Structures are given as structure tokens and as C-alpha cells.
Image (tube, rainbow, N blue to C red):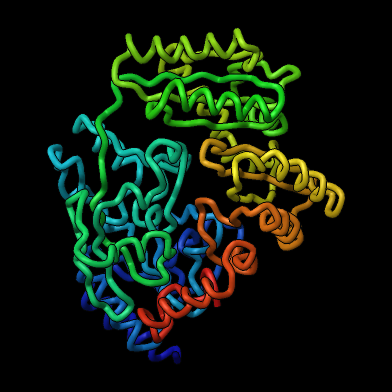
Amino acid sequence: MEVQARGKLVEDLASKLGPNAVLAGADIPDRARTDWSFLPATAPFAVFRPSSTEEVALILRSCNEAGIAVTPQGGMTGLCGGARPLDGGVGLSMERMVGIDSIDSDGMMMIVRAGTPLETIQKAADDAGLFFALDLGARGSCVIGGNLSTNAGGNRVIRYGMARDLVLGLEVVLPDGTVLPMLNRMLKNNAGYDLKQLFVGAEGTLGVITRAVLRLHPKPGCVCAAMCVVTGYDKVLELLGTARRNLGPFLSAFEVMWADYWTQATERVPNAKAPVRIGEGTHVVLVEMQGLDEEIDGARFSAWLEQMFESGVIGDGAIAQNLSDMADFWGTRDAAVEFANPDVIGPHISFDIGLPIRRIEEFVNRSKQALKDELGCHSVHYGHVGDGNIHIVAWVPGAKIQPLANASRVVYEIVGDLGGTVSAEHGIGLLKKPYLEHTRDQAQIELMRRIKRCIDPALTLNPTKIFD
């Protein structure tokens, strides 16, 4: 599209949307040019900031007719380049579509706008005496539209499931501006295809989520947490198995940190605390239980931990006595957000993969050795082992430019060999697109392309993402 025509589009939309809704040229902030993927910033010619579903529809319809690529943008906390706009395209920022429309305590649900930060939703549910289960380390920055578009996972998938398990309905705008008002409020609704699930995890390639009906749960009556030091992955699996049997549906998190990660998180991160001493242990496990009654369920949790100590499964550990202890426990697990600090690790490569739980240690050993031998990479490992999701941080010490492509090849080939997935919770975006075939065969990828072409024949909505 010629520069003059682009300028006219911006002028026309600005006159209809208002001056605060359109940013162009030097007014486009750096944060709208790329996400947390470390990919270079791009040069979109405009960023539109709608404040209503009708404005989203107008923008998409106008850009679709003009053949302009539109990239939906939320909190820009993605790690795979999914919200990174194209050079010469436009960004569609949801930052003005913020707010809680309603909370239904009887129906255990709330309706929210797509640009609402996750932490705001969590607090609104808590204030209403309820609980929204999705939780991520970027909770203060990420927004619900992005969470749903990437089918975010987070810390409590083992109990509550992924983002798609926490949404009852959606309002979505298609690339041609058609609005789908699918704001279902019922847990049971089998009236034809469950169309909302087509857009959850689609990374904004099929439609733009503008509002969501979120499923809520009762607020936990008590929360118990412990950090457990174990020696050997077999002990990790034994601890997980007994936690499932003894704590049942109350088990809400089972996070594992390998010794290499623990060293970085507790010795290198500024102001870090080490709630336990790892000593000769190989893994530190953070176990969380959300119960109904402190006296009954707290006693159940303590009795289970005592049994694990006595049987030798746990070598050392600590139980949270208050909210401060709980924050310290989770602080070690969330410390990875500080790894980009030059005093900790600096430039690095992050991986988010999923594997059958029993094969995770095999993957860790193989990938760690292969990265070291082939590329001179150091690597550390941590993740939500209870749901089979592992994160890897890899880096060549002192290198400002890290070997992303080669490290990805090494890691994803092993993932494919072990029957895993190249993306457990962060999506595909741009960075993982070359490796999608390690997880999806050609028939599945071609079906995705057919769905994309059916809904977006002009290929204007977030093109180049997931697949070509």
C-alpha cells in the first residue's frame, strides 16, 4: 500500500476514532514494536487503540479492505514474537479496552474486557469472595486477551487446567469486521460447535478477542505450601504420586527446580532468599495445596509431609508459616524473570516445552549435554512438572548474541524424539514456527492453514505467525 494511501487510512480512522486512538510515526512507543521475544523492533506505520468492540470491527474491516496486515497486541509479554507487528503493517493495541463488566457470584463467572490485566481480574474475583485460577509470573503486565489467545498455562494447571478450561464464552471480531457475540454464561451448552475454542490458542490469527466470560471458583479456605529437597528424579515422581493420592483435588501446584536453576535463582538474583538448603539434593519441589478448612486440610498437608520425611522421600524442607513465607517460596520459582539482568545471566534463550512426565529427566540430561557439547551453552531447568511443562534457560557465557537457531534445533529435535511438544504454554509465534513439525504432522498443519484461509482469505490478521 502506498504511503499516501496509508496516510489517508490513518487520517480517516483518526477522524472516526478520535486522536487518542491512533498513533503514527514517531508517536508509536517502543513497546508496540516488539514483545519479550528479544526479536528486533519493527516499523509499523500505525498503532490503533480502540476503546470498544465496534471500533475494533471498524479497524479490522478498514484494514482488511485495504489489504493491510494487522497484529493484535495485549500486554506484549509474549516470548515468541506473536504480538510483534510487521514492517509496514499496523498494531491493534487493546490497552484501552480495560475493565470488569460484571461478576455473577451465583453463576461463578465474570465478564471482562480483553485488555484487562490478569492481576486486576484476580483482585476483582478476590474482592467478590471468589477465585480466578489462572496465574502467571507476568500477572501484573499480561492481559486476559493475550492469555486466552495463547492458551496460557501458568502455575496451577495441575488443578484448574489451561486458560481454555477457564473461559465460558467470548466476544470475537473476525478479520472482515464481523462480530461474533459468543458470550455464553453457562457451564453446559452443547448447541453446535464450541466456536470459542477455535480462537483460544490461535494467537490472534483467526479473530480478535474483545470480551470474555471467565469461569470462577470458590476462594480457597486455606493455602498450604512447602519446599522439599529431594535427591533423584525418581523421588520427584514418588513425591508427585503421593501428593496426588493424599491431597487429591486440593493439590494446586507442583513446581520443580533443578539444582542448576536453584543456584542461579538463590545466589545470583538480587535480594533473593533461599528458604531451604539444597545441599546434595538434585531438585527442589514447591508443593501447594488449596484447601477448604485450615484445621482439617492444614493437618492433612502436614501429615503427608511428615510421612514423606519419615519415608526418606524428602531430605530437607520448609513449610510456609505465613504469607511472607509463601511469597519467598514463589519468589524462587519466579526468579527467572530476573535472569536477563547482566549481573545474573544477561542475554539468554528461553524454552517452553512439554513432555511425558516420566521422560522429563531424560530430556534434561540429553539437552543439557547436547547444548554444552555442540554450542558451549550453559543451561538451567525448572517448571510445572505436575503437568509436564518444563522451562529451559540456555546461554553462552559472555555472548551478547546467543545461538538461538542452533540451540532451538538441538532442543526441539530431542523434544520431538521423546514425543513432546515445542510449546507447552507460550504459543508458536515466529520463533517456534520452523519447529512446529516436531509436534504437528503435515496433515494437521495443512488443516490449520485451511481454517486460516477460510476465516481470513485476505491473510491480513497477524500473518506470518504459527505457519506460513
In this orientation, which residue lies closer to the viewer: 218 or 440? 440
Q: Quick check: 352 above or below 269? A: below
Task: Residue at 46% x, 56% y: name it.
Answer: 76
Count of all numbered marks drawn on residues in the image: 0
Is residue 268 visible in the rendered image? The answer is: no
Task: Residue at 20% x, 44% y: name it.
Answer: 109
Task: Residue at 44% x, 50% y: name it.
Answer: 152
Residue 114, position in %: x, y? 30, 56
Of the 4 image quadrants, the one containing the C terminus is bottom right
Q: Quadrant of residue 192?
A: bottom left
Q: Quick check: 236 above or below 50? A: above
In this orientation, which residue lies closer to the viewer: 415 or 213? 415
Of the 4 image quadrants, the one containing the N terminus is bottom left
Q: Is residue 227 left or right of residue 205?
A: right
Q: Quadrant of residue 19?
A: bottom left
Q: Is residue 255 left or right of residue 98?
A: right
In this orientation, which residue lies closer to the viewer: 267 or 303? 303
Is residue 262 visible in the rendered image? The answer is: yes
Residue 271, position in %: x, y? 59, 25
> Residue most toward the front?
245
Q: Quick check: 58 above or below 312? A: below
Task: Residue at 68% x, 30% y: name it.
Answer: 233
Q: Quadrant of residue 130?
A: top left
Residue 344, position in %: x, y? 69, 36
> Residue most toward the right?
373
Q: Quick check: 71 above or below 368? A: below
